[in-house]
Amino acid sequence: MSGVSASPACEPTLRVRGVHKTFGDLRALDDVDLEVREGEVVVVIGPSGSGKSTLIRCVHQLETIDAGAIYLDGELLGHERHGATLRPLPQRRVAAQRRRMSMVFQQFNLFPHFTVLRNITEAPVRVHGRSVAEAERDARALLERVGLGDRADNYPRQLSGGQQQRVAICRAVATRPRIVLFDEPTSALDPELVEEVLGVMRGLAADGMTMIVVTHEMAFAREVADRCVFMESGRVVESGPPRELFANPGTARLRSFLARHN
Ligand code: ADP
Ligand code: MG
């Protein structure tokens, strides 16, 4: 699925090192480290306000960080080094880095005045310079795969929430990103629509897509995650393979979180 060159064998696709982020007096991220290797699925869990969205928004360069560093395929994001100091990159270079990632939001955020097809082809054509014919061919193939092959000419408002989120996932992968960041992609859905979206995400994971998924769907985490990260108060409290982590939580905080979410 990825048309971009892979990282060298030892280099993780994403590396988050000692990241701090404050909003006024509030420490939203407090010395966070995270690595995601090519093809890995990392699920981030934790109570509301623990910094999960802030973490992936910092990765996607929607927030600037106060300290630390984030690397995509070994390339420092948002800054460049001049000797010992870091300087912010010009906006156009940050935009180029951001184009190598995609994000899927809780509220889908489809363009309401574009058809389903145009929602998916817009970025590949306008931002990545692909031909309309190629982008449409790819978009139709993606729609087939998520069971929406007959919906290309519909507008978002004509679709259910689960269908809209499946389109949003097609849009996210149509640019062939190095990593897809999901922020509670099923939290806004009626319960009966959750599974159709998780099914699409399972398929992506099986295809080897590199993903960070913030979710409260513990069964999904258990089945699909290579690694699960538990955050609280802006810190990574524990992480590990989900089966081990859920069977043997090392902290009372994770134990009580799991008791509330299982
Ligand atoms: P989560 O996604 O785990 O629920 P968030 O990352 O959204 O948590 O938020 C972490 C903390 O940072 C919360 O206390 C939240 O209120 C605060 N926060 C997040 N974004 C902002 C912002 N733009 N301005 C001020 N505070 C923020
Ligand atoms: Mg959040």
Image (cartoon, grey):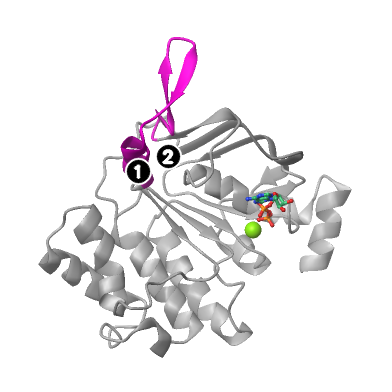
Give the SS element for disc 2.
Answer: loop
Q: Residue at x 80, y 52 (%)?
A: 254
Q: Quadrant of the N terminus?
A: bottom left
Q: Residue at x 76, y 38 (%)?
A: 25
Q: In this orientation, does residue 108 appear?
A: yes
- 36 lies left or right of 91: right
Amino acid type shown at disc 2: Thr
Q: What residue is disc 2 on?
A: 13
Mark 1 or mark 2, which is nearer to you?
A: 1
Question: At which x and y percent is residue 241?
Answer: 64, 49
Is 63 situated above or below 142? above
Q: In this orientation, does residue 144 appear?
A: no
Q: Residue at x 58, y 28 (%)?
A: 68
Is 112 situated above or below 18? below
Q: Are marks 1 and 2 in contact (CB under 8 Å)?
A: no
Q: Which residues are magenta?
A: 73-98
Q: Going from the N terminus, do you reach mark 1 or mark 2 first?
A: 2
Give the SS element for disc 1.
Answer: helix
Q: What residue is disc 1 on?
A: 95
Q: Quadrant of the C terminus?
A: bottom right
Amino acid type shown at disc 1: Ala
Q: How many marks?
A: 2
Q: Which mark is residue 72?
A: none
Question: At which x and y percent is residue 3?
Answer: 24, 49
Q: Quadrant of residue 223?
A: bottom right
Seen from this angle, which residue lies furthest front?
24
Q: CA distance from mark 1 to mark 2?
A: 18 Å
> Is residue 85 located in the magenta-colored stretch of the structure?
yes
